[in-house]
Amino acid sequence: MSDIEEEPLSVSSKAFVYYAPGDVRREILDMKCPKDGLLVRIRVAGLCSTDRSIYLKGHPKVDSNTPVVLGHELCGEIVERGPQVGENRKGIGYWEGKEIEPELMDFHEGERVTFQSRIAQYRDGLMLTENPITILSFRMNGGYAEYMEVPGVLLRSGSVLRVPTDISDVSAALVEPAACALEALFATPHACGVDHEGRHLFRAGVKDGGYTCIIGSGTLAMIYALLAKRLGAERVMVLVRSQDKAKLVEEILQGKAEPCMIPKYSAQPLSERLQVEAEIVNCLRQRTEGRLFDDVVLACPDPDAQRLMLDLYSMDGYAVGSCFAGIRTRVDQVDLDSNHYRMAKTIGTSGCSTRTMETVMHWLEQGQIALDNLVSPEHFDLDCLPHDFFTAKTGGLKPILYPCS
């Protein structure tokens, strides 16, 4: 038996490399398998709206680490395992304080994997968004490339998830955004009673048997609708702004949600926007027998929609509004009484934990949700212009990059 350690596999990888807003270049990167990690061939990578925003406007947490390969919604295949994988089994992040069981580190060539992109610190099982250990595609190269180097820090933090054989590549790539949506829904606290001292008691998740409203009509909005039904919502309505989007919601969600057309009004003066929103609220009140919504999810980066969200809360009981990520824009004429006088709460969230990714993967494997039909049929690869991919308009469906096609 030879004591000579074999040299790790080296590859030349095409990649979209981000330098600055509007500046993504097609380059060839030399990569090799980390000794304590993996070399992964990227099968598919989805375009996240965050990556689109980074391309158009930049991002302070990305621009300080350029050049970098973006892309964190992906499915890849292991082509090499480093010789030191499993030697250090002290857990970090999600596995902090644990001695990692050997089988959890027993990755092998040919396995498909996906990734939890924010390698975070945790407290009491809760993911902390501040001061992460690292962030895939922000501080280290991501999936808009033929190959990706996966360092040991991702393995030891439980951030590399195996993809079961009966889950497709594109569904595996959508596990991360679906888990981000689920993270937001699982953080919603519905009051379910009081204890003997009058202390409010809460149940996390959309209200079981309740009404849910989704503002937005893209892939994330439809994922929210699917998850709301899976979590027990009796009725789900999706607010859209065109007949084409209404048709898409009907085709994709197949009766699990009702599309509701609202007008485009963001270009109007504020006084007219407020009037339009009042009319929208009145229309939805009639469609819900005066009830309005127990859960309202903001799944679009629109300041007016954030104001509208507060006016769609149920007048009775406890209503929750969930804002996915932030819009970093001041919202004029917000009626805070929507929160103050009603039993209501608005939460914001960004990212997902490893545990919610595991939950989504389990639901996919059990056939409890399906994500395959949420991706665009349009084909993008690394020979296309980066601008065409990052600004792709695919009618509300997820643009997918096929790096090795």
Image (cartoon, rainbow, N blue to C red):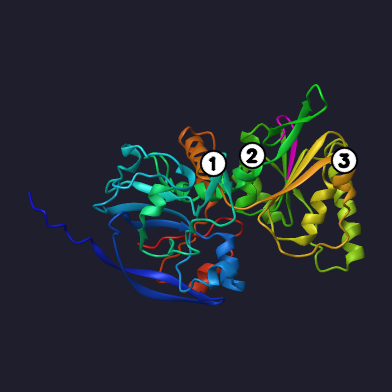
- The first of marks 3 and 2 along the sequence is 2
> CB of mark 1 within 8 Å of CB of mark 2?
yes
Label 1 to label 3: alpha-carbon separation: 30 Å
Q: Is residue 397 left or right of residue 277?
A: left
Amino acid type indicated by mark 3: Arg
> CB of mark 3 within 8 Å of CB of mark 2?
no
Residue under the image location 49 percent in, 61 percent down: 378
Residue 209 inside the magenta-drawn segment: yes
Residue 112 rendering spot, x and y as whole percentages: 36, 47
Label 1 to label 2: alpha-carbon separation: 9 Å
Label 3 to label 2: alpha-carbon separation: 21 Å
Q: Is residue 169 visible?
A: no
Residue 208 inside the magenta-drawn segment: yes
Residue under the image location 51 percent in, 43 percent down: 357
Q: Residues within 10 Å of mark 3 (few under 14, many from 20)?
A: some
- The first of marks 1 and 2 along the sequence is 2
- Quadrant for the C terminus, please: bottom left
The residue segment tinted magenta is 207-213
Label tally: 3
Residue underneath mark 2 = 186
Q: Is residue 240 left or right of residue 158?
A: right
**Label at residue 356:** 1
Q: Is residue 153 left or right of residue 222?
A: left
The local secondary structure at tag 1 comes to helix
Q: Residues within 10 Å of mark 2 (few under 14, many from 20)?
A: some
Residue 102 rendering spot, x and y as whole percentages: 31, 38
Q: Residues within 10 Å of mark 1 (few under 14, many from 20)?
A: many
Amino acid type indicated by mark 2: Phe
Residue 180 rendering spot, x and y as whole percentages: 58, 48
